[in-house]
Image (cartoon, helix red, strand yellow):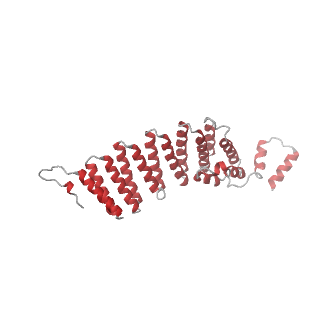
Amino acid sequence: MRTSGLKTGFLKWKPDYDSAASEYGKAAVAFKNAKQFEQAKDACLKEAVAHENNRALFHAAKAYEQAGMMLKEMQKLPEAVHLIEKASMMYLENGTPDTAAMALERAGKLIENVDPEKAVQLYQQTANVFENEERLRQAVELLGKASRLLVRGRRFDEAALSIQKEKNIYKEIENYPTCYKKTIAQVLVHLHRNDYVAAERCVRESYSIPGFNGSEDCAALEQLLEGYDQQDQDQVAEVCNSPLFKYMDNDYAKLGLSLVVPGGGVKKKAAAPPQAKPEGTAAPAAEDEEDEYAGGLC
């Protein structure tokens, strides 16, 4: 490979990084077309260094990103993501945050199936970049990806916080119906954390969202919490099998279908009266007592 652009001579005191970068770039394309990805990656890295030496940050970042894509072709995904992250930082430094965000999101997609934890971090970084640019719709979309991955990995504490961030942004942009859906997601996550109090608080706080009180989402959540509190697995299953829950994002629908009430999910409708009625009733009628014992002894 010719790199004469970097040579100096009597009349040329500074190496020509621009010409060198161009030559390395052409070489990278040729290697890529020949499917010689290792050599293509090396050429991209040399191109990136030449651009850096020439203080051309944007072009250096592009070359690093291309080197990352060559590593992707070689199935070296963690190394690929590392270079794409490096590129995104340079895009930010160059003042092109949109390009930085797109690079980070691309890296997240690459690594999602191999290292979901890293993908969550990348999606959250992307969301932060968009949020700093006041592009809230793009930010909340990336937060949603992070939330779903956290749920999939059963990292429910982090998922609860992530969904709350989503909900706050949807409220800010006045997308209230989506806030209702995020409340359902929150409640399911909190119940899987065995935190009924937090789930109930989410619903209570959502009453302040315009239109929530009286919506089908609100009614379903009240029914779900009632069933969960009374350890009524049938009622919980009925709510979680309703179209409102089943047609949510797949990760949340699965949370609903796998939700088990305290006590292992044993039906409590028949078993509940002997425990609940003596506490709640001071002096039951004689015939009521007969029915109670009959039900309790079954």
Q: Residue at x 46, y 53 (%)?
A: 119
The answer to which of 36 and 131 lies nearer the viewer is: 36
On screen, residue 291 versus residue 174, left or right, reads right
Query: Given the current orientation, which residue lies at the most extreme left position?
Result: 10
* Residue 220 to residue 69: above or below: above
Residue at 40% from the left image edge and 46% from the top image edge: 99
Q: Position of residue 144 (x, y in %)?
A: 52, 47
Look at 86% across and 49% down and name the residue there.
Answer: 290
Residue 37 vertical placement versus 97 (above, below): below
The x, y position of residue 252, in whole percent, is 59, 51
Tell me which residue sits at (35%, 61%) in the image.
Answer: 32
Can you tell which quarter of the image residue 7 is in?
Answer: bottom left
- The relative height of residue 241 versus residue 214 in the rendered view (above or below) is below
Q: Which image quarter is the C terminus in?
A: bottom right
Give left or right: position of 65 versus 22.
right
Horizontal and vertical percent for residue 128?
45, 43
Q: Is residue 204 above or below residue 43?
A: above
4, 52: nearer the viewer: 4
Horizontal and vertical percent position of residue 34: 34, 65
